[in-house]
Amino acid sequence: MEFMIEFGLFLAKATTLLVLALVLVTAMAGVLRNARQPEPLSGRLEVRHLNDEYRTAGLTLKAAIMPAKALKRERKALKASRKQRGEDGRPRLFVLDFHGDIRASATESLRDEITAILTVANDQDEVLVRLESGGGTIPSYGLAAAQLLRLRDRGLRLTVAVDRVAASGGYMMACVADHVLAAPFAIVGSIGVIAQVPNFNRVLKKHEIDFEQFMAGEHKRTVTLFGENTDQGRQKFQQEIEQAHELFKLFVSRYRPQVDLAEIATGEYWYGTEALKHQLADQILTSDEYLLKRSENTEIFLIKKRIRRPLLSRLLPGAGDALSRLRAPL
């Protein structure tokens, strides 16, 4: 009897290990398959009618506090208003969300969302971007800002709402808007450029490790991680940083000429109320309050482009890019 119990336990353990092995093999096969195939450019475009969501939320609360007859009248009124809204051609407000990382990865979805809006919008419509970003690389955020400019170039009113933070590259995007909203304690500004480069040259020397670097072009490499940096290289690198800062300031002045760049282009950031004083923002208001007020006379649609990413990219952010670099031709 004891033998049978031990055998049963052994069989259960073996079965468990086999199932886990099959799951692991299946998952790895999916990862490798996705790694071999390029990520699809298409995705699913989601559209939510926020007016209906606001009214449904209000009706849910009324159901708990109103008598049955009064609630019935409310439901009839809601149904009639929905029919009327379909006939009166009210202006539309399209809402986009942008949550930026250091590489502004959300630009991919932003591009497709804006393209979709431009196929249906007219000059009576407005776009609200709920922006949140602490900044990142200049080319990435320059492209994201250029996507927003597509809306302005087509004559659409562009509003940017900063509920928490739009700094550095985030403000590069925000400044192109016709109107900038900021929550009272939102972080706004930081018109500056920063670069940090660690150097391991002394560590290599200590362990008697040689580092060799070959270049064609005097300034192909200014400062380096492993080589011995020179004053000339540091000076050139600083010049490049200053040049990027000047371009950033010119960009801000083009779209917000009322801003005193000498005062605010110091790399500092300001909270919402101070940002308003410096004219970095136009109004102290949260995006939620703005949308709720606009819903009284405007049809509001939240647009979201969702792209299904490979399993490895979802489990380990950045790993998919590493695989892409490994597969890229030299």
Image: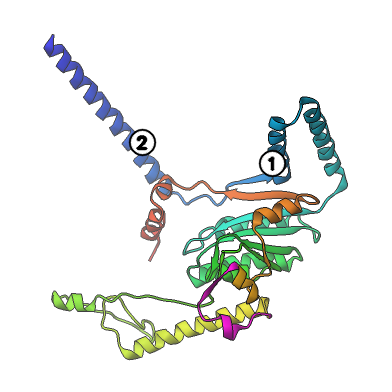
What type is the residue that disc 2 sits on?
Thr
Which numbered marker is on residue 26? Answer: 2
Can the viewer see residue 65 in this picture? yes
**Is residue 224 within the magenta segment?**
no
Residue name at image x 17 percent, y 78 percent: 205
Residue 48 or residue 293, whichever sits in front: 293
Residue 264 or residue 127, whichever sits in front: 264
- The quarter of the displayed image where residue 191 is located: bottom right
Residue name at image x 27 percent, y 26 percent: 16
Q: Residues within 10 Å of mark 1 (few under 14, many from 20)?
A: few
Nearer-N-terminus badge (2/1)? 2
- Residue that mark 1 sits on: 53
Q: Which residues are magenta?
A: 258-272
What type is the residue that disc 1 sits on?
Glu
- The quarter of the displayed image where residue 240 is located: bottom left
Question: Looking at the picture, does residue 274 appear above or below residue 229?
Answer: above
Indicate the secondary structure of the residue bearing disc 2. Answer: helix
Can the viewer see residue 218 in this picture? no
Question: Looking at the picture, does residue 302 appear above or below residue 282?
Answer: above
